[in-house]
Amino acid sequence: MNRLILPGTAPSVNHMYEDKWIRGRKIRIKTPEAEAWYQEAVLRAKMWIARNRWQQQSGKVYVLIWVFFPDKRRRDPDNGLKALLDALEDAGIYTDDKTALPHIMDYETDPANPRLEIEFKEYKSYNNVLERLKWT
């Protein structure tokens, strides 16, 4: 199965929302940049689903993530997980992002092509601890 590749990096929660005053109430809304990234991620994930004939999962799913940053600034590779996991739910990878088991597999710097590469594996419950360490 091919990896889902999303260009750029997912916005962190700190950069995903902004406060707006509407009718005297302060509410948090997605920034235009975060909304654009989100919509692009949902669209690309839906195209990946169609190409790979992925069936939406209602049970647990391993979400294996490789992060390629645009520069060498210090960052946490897991900062964008909320936006990413929500987008994958909206695309139909799984029915509820609480069933997603995200794993950051590695991170690198690639200024020419910052991106997220993602693989999905259905979670299988094993009785033997050694069997859990194998990816099937």
Image (cartoon, rainbow, N blue to C red):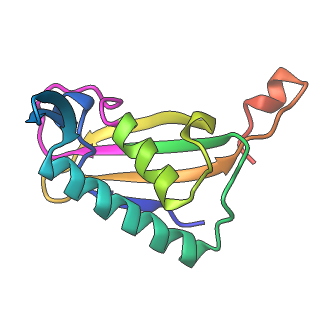
Does the magenta-highlighted stretch encompass residue 63? no
Q: Residue at (83%, 31%) from the top-left corner?
A: 131
Q: Residue furthest bottom?
A: 51
Q: Nearer the viewer, residue 87 or 5?
A: 87
Q: Which residues are magenta?
A: 67-80
Q: Does the magenta run of residues contain 71?
A: yes
Q: Is residue 90 above or below residue 24?
A: below
Q: Decide if residue 54 is on the left or right side of residue 29.
A: right
Q: Quadrant of residue 43?
A: bottom left
| Residue 88 seen by the camera | yes
Can you tell which quarter of the image residue 15 is in? top left
Q: Which residue is the extreme one toward the top?
A: 129
Nearer the observer, 15 or 66 = 15
For the N terminus, the image quarter is bottom right
The residue shown at (57%, 56%) is 93
Figure label count: 0
Query: Considering only vertical position in the picture, is 44 above or below 112?
Result: below
Q: Residue at x 23, y 53 (%)?
A: 35
- x, y (%) of residue 116? 34, 51
Provide residue 65's location: percent of width, then percent of height. Answer: 45, 43
Instruction: Classify residue 60 as left or right of residue 4.
Output: right
Residue at the image point whose x is 45% and y is 34% from the top: 104
Magenta highlight: main SS:
loop
